[in-house]
Image (cartoon, grey):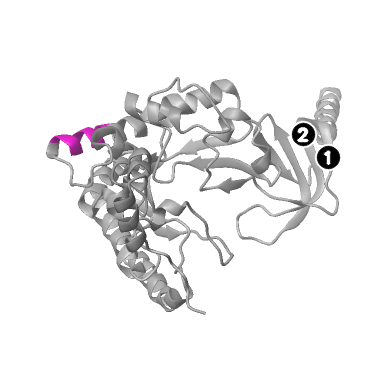
Amino acid sequence: MKRFYSSLLFSLILLFASCSSTEKYDILIKNGTIVDGSGNNSFVGNIAVNSDTIAAMGDLTNAKGTIEIDATGLTIAPGFINMLSWANVSLIEDGRSQGDIRQGVTLEILGEGRSMGPLNEAMKKEMKDGQQSITYDISWTSLGEYLQFLEDKGVSTNVASFIGNGTVREYVMGYQNRPPTEEELEQMQGLVREAMVEGAVGLSTSLIYVPSGHAQTEEITALASIASEYDGMYISHIRDEEGKLLEAVQELITIAKEADIRSEIYHFKASGNENWHLLDSAIQLVNDARNQGLPISTDMYMYNASSTGLNVLLPSWAKEGGHNSTMELIAQPAQRKKMMDEIDFHVPPE
């Protein structure tokens, strides 16, 4: 009997100790309104963090943090994703990424149609010559080496990148506006494969720009098929967001189906109010594809504006050789007049 009471007392002591023990964390955020990203209703609670990982969430009555933050009256959410980031150069200058971090962005996705690798010597020279206020040495060749360069230098945000078809095409074919040969296509596929092995999240295109837009549907599909082998996705600034919006959406759907790849449309919209009537039909195309089992998604910004470089207004022949070639043409009066006659100013009707 004495042994029984001793065992019972010991068990009660252990139970009491376990109930009253304090959990230690690096950071404890207390009493905030938590929006967890699941789509469920928000709730008031605590979040505990160890290193870069959320370790616990909920009541956490017995938790203590080396750093404790009172979030009463504030909202807590997972880090936001900047899924079309152009911080590829600014991160080299200042890896703190304050412009994104202070808005809650914790992941930057680079590489809309063009990526920071692979680079051949001609591309490195072009990149070096095009540097403006931010100057830097180009010590990498592949996309993976660029990402490692950022990691070694130190960046605050998480960073990932697509492999841009425009970069791959320039590496193999320069700015030539023609279909690739069989050998050139195989070389481009090899570059996509290398990038996927190095950690690229998929293939991207930006088809209103050169040389990305020189690629036709079959070529893009061949490259996307490689990304699909590594469970990557295909994402596109589609070929037309104006009068031929529906054809451009259908092209993406075709690529998704033929390459068996998850696909997304960048900044989905009908540009120009004379084209707004097309948007419902474009949405229907996407929904029909999804109903057929194709994993297609879209993203958009929720304001009635957009911006890009003025060179998109130039006729395609004026952009075939890249920026330096275009500037040489502009310097020739006859060619400059031809450009002006053919320039495509998009001015919506009143």
Q: Say which residue appears at 27% left-offset and 49% top-offset.
A: 214
Percent coordinates x, y for residue 245 in the rendering:
36, 68
Camera-nearest residue between 219 and 243:
243
Quarter of the N terminus within the rendering: top right
Nearer to the camera, 25 or 256: 256
Q: Residue at x 86, y 51 (%)?
A: 72
Q: Amino acid at mark 2?
A: Ile
| Left or right position of 8 against 100 | right
Badges 2 and 1: C-beta atoms under 8 Å apart? yes
Task: Identify the magenta region.
Answer: 183-190
Inspect this view and state whether residue 26 appears. yes
* Amino acid on which the number 1 mark rests in the picture: Ile
* Main secondary structure type of the part rendered in magenta: helix
The residue that label 2 is drawn on is 27
Question: In the rendered view, would you say 271 is above or below 262?
Answer: below
Q: Position of residue 209 (x, y in %)?
A: 37, 50
The 10 Å Cα crowd at callout 2, few under 14, some 14 to 19, many 20 or more, is: many
Q: Is residue 185 magenta?
A: yes
